[in-house]
Amino acid sequence: MPRTAVIAGVGPGLGESIARKFADEGCSVGLFARSEDYLDELAADLPGEALAVPTDLTDPDAIRAGFDAVREDLGPVDVLVNHASAGSWKGLLDASVEEFERAFHVNGRGAFVCSQEAVSDMLGQEGRGAEADQDDEAGGTIIFTGATSAVRGREGAIGFSAAKFAARGMAESMAREFGPEGVHVAHVVVDGQIRTPQARESDRPAHEFFDPDEIAETYWHLVEQDRSAWTLELDLRPHVEEF
Amino acid sequence: MPRTAVIAGVGPGLGESIARKFADEGCSVGLFARSEDYLDELAADLPGEALAVPTDLTDPDAIRAGFDAVREDLGPVDVLVNHASAGSWKGLLDASVEEFERAFHVNGRGAFVCSQEAVSDMLGQEGRGAEADQDDEAGGTIIFTGATSAVRGREGAIGFSAAKFAARGMAESMAREFGPEGVHVAHVVVDGQIRTPQARESDRPAHEFFDPDEIAETYWHLVEQDRSAWTLELDLRPHVEEF
Amino acid sequence: MPRTAVIAGVGPGLGESIARKFADEGCSVGLFARSEDYLDELAADLPGEALAVPTDLTDPDAIRAGFDAVREDLGPVDVLVNHASAGSWKGLLDASVEEFERAFHVNGRGAFVCSQEAVSDMLGQEGRGAEADQDDEAGGTIIFTGATSAVRGREGAIGFSAAKFAARGMAESMAREFGPEGVHVAHVVVDGQIRTPQARESDRPAHEFFDPDEIAETYWHLVEQDRSAWTLELDLRPHVEEF
Amino acid sequence: MPRTAVIAGVGPGLGESIARKFADEGCSVGLFARSEDYLDELAADLPGEALAVPTDLTDPDAIRAGFDAVREDLGPVDVLVNHASAGSWKGLLDASVEEFERAFHVNGRGAFVCSQEAVSDMLGQEGRGAEADQDDEAGGTIIFTGATSAVRGREGAIGFSAAKFAARGMAESMAREFGPEGVHVAHVVVDGQIRTPQARESDRPAHEFFDPDEIAETYWHLVEQDRSAWTLELDLRPHVEEF
């Protein structure tokens, strides 16, 4: 089944690896991020259909318009990756209310609106929804990119910790609400540093970093899991990472 | 040592029990909530000093003004209970963005601003802060009232789950940041229903509910814990509660 | 109500502090450990009734005989602290099967047999058991002394990790089984180093260690909690401990 | 790379599905269980090399002899699945010491000895061990089959809860010890009922059960994960399972 996937929060690193993997597996891909130039370039480089959707993920109306554009071009959404992340690394006394709240707007509220849009598609199509049984190709998959700070509040990163915890709580709530209707919700705790273009220039040995393409393999496995055996949460880390 | 305590989010039920217990133990108490009449009545009924602070906890400026009023009347804050809670019990597709966000404004952002104010007092006084050692009567205590939905995202309560998770992440972040400086941060997972005035009229047997006065005993124990042996998290439930 | 308490695994440090605190609060105390001389000295030093019960906690029959001795001298058991701990700090390839298993015999099987004996007493007395309601002085309290390795398997301590996890699983199972009958089961994650006589001679500053008397305060609070608001699990650590 | 895999505790249901999947992917498979007839039949039915190893997993010497047989026939072990499980479903007062301990002997001690044997192989071969870097095809994979009772102690199943917790603690300890050396340790929380031959005859609808072949897909994904992005723990459940 060809699928339409939205990656909300694409950038060089893991977001791009996910987009490439999903496109390689035959997905049409909607790419949401702020940088139009970057998205255009990436969309042009992917095999198959891809739509660049320059979007501010802190703006609910912009998100909704983005999903409309995806539906029109690529069809209803089957897969959503809530991948956007933001948060100043500041402690309680240094963070402003605006900085604290911005982390929540991206990680929490943005994912909330994206999920509303995606679940509507997943439940709304013929053969989907409450009547679906295990033989239908119905429902869909929503993956949240979590972080260590989603399970362990980090000193000096109060807004980020609050926002990543919030997203994990949302993921669990949604998994319980929509699992029986065929929507697979998963939360991935990404514990380690990703080998981004900048990281490649650091002095640390390469094997201390995640290879983002390898993380994307596990994201794809989550999409492919049969509804008879779904994962809600898993962690990922480089083999030398201390934890 | 007489202490000044702020209870942010007081109402009939647990908030009031905490206020009474802390007042009985000699605390001066600042009572934050929206209902002026209720607060005035409660303040008048408490032994010792108590200040009614009618406040909208979704308004950062109102919170700051409230702490100023407490400081002026009762002195710098030693104990804060982040007890306010809000959240419509709606699932992903039924909750509006405003409803989703409101839960975070009360449980998350409100607690963030209250904590900023309280920690400033706790670190700012003579003999407090980074130089404090274990012999000083320095620092303070911040207790978050959590819920089952802080550790297990609840179906059909997405905003509440996100907000209670967020508060737990904040509590952990703050505990790591300020523990070494003498500020004890604790998160209490309150798992069950509290015997409020309304609950007393239900048909369920009384022993299936929390007695809020008994919860308040454990809150006070957290305040009294010596810094040599602090609790970050504990759960509480009635002995017949399933979990 | 005067209570009879068994401390299984007493030694200089936390076990002794718990025994002293409980005796100070009016408990008759049964002291289980291998060293007869040490126990005799401690029993003589406690206020009120205390019974030294030299016991090998890896021997189920010896445990049962010990409880019989306590019953005869001090009456049925109201409080049990499963405090014994053992485990060689070895990794998978260095630990022998015997070493691996010994940790389980002390932390797991020993606590199992002690709990069987104690729960029988707690449920067996008049006014106790299934018919008990919240007004009865029935039931009892069982506290497990856990460790960081009960919630986070430690590298190079495989037997200890397995055994401390096992004890935590037992505690949860027992809490669910006997809570409704009035037996309060609690598991305390003790995360840090305790200021034992040896530790006092180390170069590390005193405030980096637990004061075991302060831990004992929280153990006593657990015993005193009303059944309307019980804690299953809490953590404890010195305020400067990293975690 | 053709791999040698040991499945410790094979039976109709998940164990067999894992064996078939791994054999389909080209593994030579060593099958450990007590029933010789069943193992012979299964071994004959698998594609590629398979060795039936009738073994009592509560007997350390028998386990060691079994691994020797595998090494001789199939070569050093690359993959181990600690899949054996046992435990009477009894509460504290009904379980005997022997029943309590037997659950640990299978889930805990048996997995300990199997892991000793497997890790020795994984570290012992040329190009493996401490010097291995991320380009080597070194190390191996050890998967523990966990259960809900590994993360939530179950009322009325004290021995099983203790044993499954213990295995989870071991898995974490081993992951931290051997991850840097290239051994991937993973713990799978299997939360639900598996569609075994008996379950197929029940009245419950098929989609309420796990399809064990689908669980096996995720086990294989864990084997295939690149060391740059390993999972320590994931859960699995049927999409309609309440949790």
Image (tube, coloured by chain):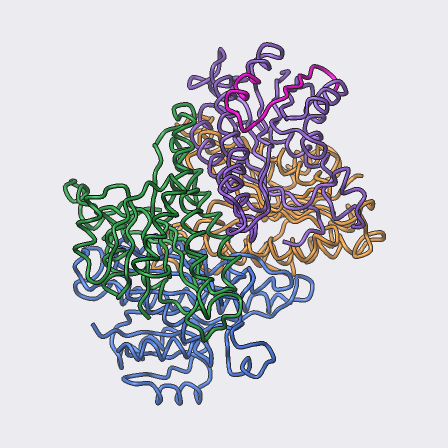
Chain colours: A orange, B blue, C green, D purple
Residue D56 drawn at (x, y percent) = 58, 26
Above/below status of C171 relative to C125: above
Q: Is residue D66 magenta?
A: yes
Q: Where is residue C167 in the image (x, y as percent from the top left)?
A: 44, 46
* Rendered view: C131 above or below D206: below
In this figure, what is the number of numbered marks? Answer: 0
Relative image position of residue A159 (x, y in whole percent): 44, 56
Residue shown at 39%/72% (left/top)?
B216
B208 on left or right of B5: right
Residue A22, quarter of picture: top right
Name the image quarter holding residue A7: top right
B25, C101: nearer the viewer: C101
Q: In which quadrant of the rendered view does residue A30 lie?
A: top right
Q: In this view, does A211 lie to the left or right of D3?
A: left
Residue C190 to residue B103: above or below: above
Which residues are drawn in magenta? Answer: D46-67
Measured as percent of width and height from the top left, residue B237 is found at 48, 65
Residue at 34% x, 38% y: name it: C86
Residue C90 to residue B49: above or below: above
Please tell me which residue lies in front, B32 or C78.
C78
In reply to whether residue D199 is colored magenta, the answer given is no
